[in-house]
Amino acid sequence: MTRDDAWRLLTEFTASESLRKHALAVEAAMRHYAAHFNEDVPLWGLVGLVHDFDYERWPEPPAHTREGARLLRERGVGEEIVGAMLSHAEWNQGDYPLDRPLRKTLFAVDEMCGFVMAVAYVRPERLAGMAPSSVRKKMKQKSFAAAVKREDLERGAALLEIPLDDHINHVIQALQGIAPELGLTVPSPDPAA
């Protein structure tokens, strides 16, 4: 599977701009961590890009990820990618445990990317100058991005065996690198104002 193949698959099954941006964010974070851990950057990026490609059509567990895995296998995608995608959903972790760096990292960055993006959307500076302290502050507000399990954010850092602030910082750096694609650059001042 090439990156173009993965993008075509994502766009075939995902119409939502926000879900596409989430996939791009997770891809960027996976590539960042692959370079950090001296792993296969293109492979890790592919996993990030396709990890939720089936969510829009099959949002309910366990169809989400399992339908995607079936489609990936039908298209001849390797089991390392399929297994990683399956492992990020807790209902599959009995058969696809978080037992290797690729799987641990996908789990760690998936929710964190979503949370960091949510924080960026409410900041006038968006991702520019964001620090882990901004994210930690929002984590304490239970009503903010309430669907995100705070324990999953913390578990992700623990799986990677790095402090939570370091994990947050890695994700921020990864997303800053693609801020324009995510729509998270500082808005230009309105010249008419």
Image (cartoon, rainbow, N blue to C red):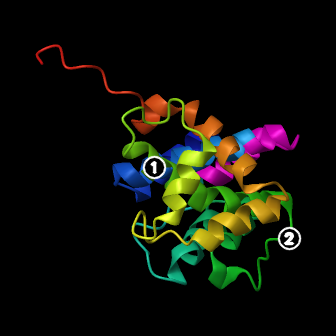
Span colored in magenta: 33-49
Q: Is residue 26 above or below residue 31?
A: below
- Residue name at image x 52 percent, y 64 percent: 140
Percent across and percent down for residue 30 are: 69, 47
- Residue name at image x 54 percent, y 30 percent: 129
Q: What element does badge 1 sit on?
A: helix
Q: In which quarter of the image is residue 72?
A: bottom right
The amino acid at mark 1 is Val
Does residue 192 appear left or right of residue 133 in this picture?
left
Percent across and percent down for residue 24 are: 53, 44
Residue 36 covered by magenta stretch: yes
Q: In which quarter of the image is residue 192?
A: top left
Residue 15 covered by magenta stretch: no
Q: What element does badge 2 sit on?
A: loop
Q: Is residue 66 above or below residue 19?
A: below
Q: Which residue lies under the disc numbered 2?
A: 99
Question: Looking at the image, which residue sits at the far top?
Answer: 191
Cα gap from disc 2 to disc 1, whole angstroms: 30 Å
- Residue name at image x 79 percent, y 76 percent: 97
Asked whether the viewer can see residue 80, the reply is no
Q: Which residue lies under the disc numbered 1?
A: 119
Residue toward you, 93 or 184? 184
The amino acid at mark 2 is Asp
Percent across and percent down for residue 104 are: 77, 63
Checking the image for residue 74, the label placed there is none
Q: Is residue 111 above or below residue 117?
A: below
Going from N to C along the chain, the mark reached first, 2 or 1, is: 2
Q: Which of marks 2 and 1 is in front?
A: 1
Percent across and percent down for residue 11 are: 43, 49
